[in-house]
Amino acid sequence: MSPRHSAAEAARTRERIIERGLDLASVEGLEGLTIGRLAAGLGISKSGLLGHFGTKQALQLAALERAAVIFNAEVWRPAAGAAPGLPRLRAVCDAWISYLTRGVFPGGCLFVSSTFEQDGRSGPVRALLQRQFHAWNRRLTAEVRTAVANGGLPRGTDPAQLVFELYGVMMSLNHAIQLHGDHAATTRATTAVARLLPREGPAARPAQPASGGKLAQ
Amino acid sequence: MSPRHSAAEAARTRERIIERGLDLASVEGLEGLTIGRLAAGLGISKSGLLGHFGTKQALQLAALERAAVIFNAEVWRPAAGAAPGLPRLRAVCDAWISYLTRGVFPGGCLFVSSTFEQDGRSGPVRALLQRQFHAWNRRLTAEVRTAVANGGLPRGTDPAQLVFELYGVMMSLNHAIQLHGDHAATTRATTAVARLLPREGPAARPAQPASGGKLAQ
DNA sequence: ATAGAGTCCGACCGATCGGTAGCTATATTG
DNA sequence: CAATATAGCTACCGATCGGTCGGACTCTAT
């Protein structure tokens, strides 16, 4: 059969560990990602697994880095082709909602669950999470500023405020899907985003506080 | 000294366990609420602690019930005196924001952290969380309906949509405070709520998508 | 052909997990 | 005062935690 101790296979083993680890972590949390269970699920030994990372913490960090790659591919890349400013912002939100609705991670967005698990602690894992959120924050904020600059959003818009509210929509969506299995929340998230990112004409939409009835598809 | 084995003292011991357990759980999560650490922190033995609850799960459930009492006292009761409908809704949101900002639980709102920890699992703890969220949901939704009925909110308002968005604001606030220590988020949450719950005249406020500049104090 | 590097394993470590058994000390009840 | 109930203790259980160690094995470089 295939060689089981070659260098090429080792890289693939590392991949398998991280991929499976992501699924496990999104359900059980970064702390619940235990080496024994992960190894058993992969059919390898604990020491064989740990040989690739050294410590559990290194494994957690590797999982978070990989999660960022996936998030980027799922949420940012599909929107990268859109025009800078409001159109791209809307594309990002569409992809973001789709990413949460499809359940790319079985236990919900790994960053959301990890955040609420790691806040109140300290150490490299929490520090990495902070940096990752900060980076995503800056990307979104910059895009909002672009939208304001080229007229997509009204001049008085506060970028940090808008990003704060967009985060809220996505967290509420993640919560509704994961705890209640409520898929109607996808529509609500879409509606909320549509109200936060109005159609091109700044004065075109009266923007009811919570638009009911038929949704804005 | 004080008797150490009386029935009256036992009730107080139980109280101490739950109170300390709440603090621990809000930081470490409901799973990280381990019997050994909790007992050590209280200066009692594991078996002495477990005698009050029987199992860890019973302790978790007791902690959640108590958390609901505290949440109720912090968020609902201060607003109960306000006029039904929009005024009470605004009072609830004010109290809610204050509750999150003051850090009543050191690790952030216990329900928020527990939710993201327990989703993807099953069992009585998750079931209780679902029921508690559901109950709070119904309370908020009913209040929104009242506000619509007595003219505080525009007629087309979708209660579930509005509650969904309010949840998002609070989760985003909890996230910003706990992960980033960002207290400017309190102002942003207030701004977001002010836009979701407009002043009495339904057509009085143009409702910019993300009000910048001076905040609505 | 042989030496070295790297992969993976089984066995094991001390610590901690949730939980149990049996006991002592106290409070309450008669 | 005697009997009962119970709060809390020490000591312990099997399971699992993250992690270490030495060796078996495969590949690669010389």
Image (spheres, coloured by chain):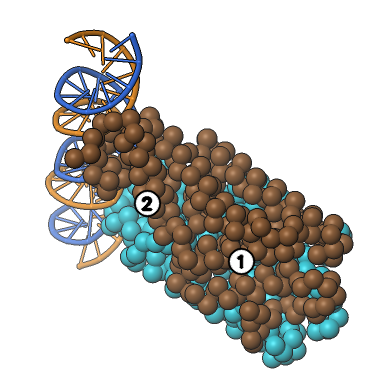
Chain colours: A brown, B cyan, C orange, D blue
Indicate the amino acid at tag 1.
Asp
Indicate the amino acid at tag 2.
Leu
Q: Toward the viewer: B191 or B97?
A: B191
Q: Residue at x 87, y 62 (%)?
A: A155
Q: Residue at x 51, y 42 (%)?
A: A65
Residue A172 figure quarter: bottom right
Q: Chain of mark 1?
A: A
Circle 1 — which element? Answer: helix
Q: Residue at x 52, y 63 (%)?
A: A100
Residue A206 placement, left or right of B34: right
Query: In which quadrant will I find the C terminus of chain B?
Result: bottom right
Q: Position of residue A123 (x, y in %)?
A: 52, 35
Q: Which residue is mark 2?
A: A24
Q: Which residue is mark 1?
A: A94
Q: Position of residue D14 (x, y in %)?
A: 15, 44
Q: Position of residue D16 (x, y in %)?
A: 26, 44
Residue A161 placement, left or right of C20: right
Residue B209 placement, left or right of A134: right
Foreground mark, 1 or 2, reads: 1
Give me the disc on residue B72. Answer: none
First in sequence: mark 1 vs mark 2: 2
Residue D30 figure quarter: top left
Residue B2 appearing in the image: no
Q: CA distance from mark 1 to mark 2?
A: 26 Å
Residue A105 appearing in the image: yes
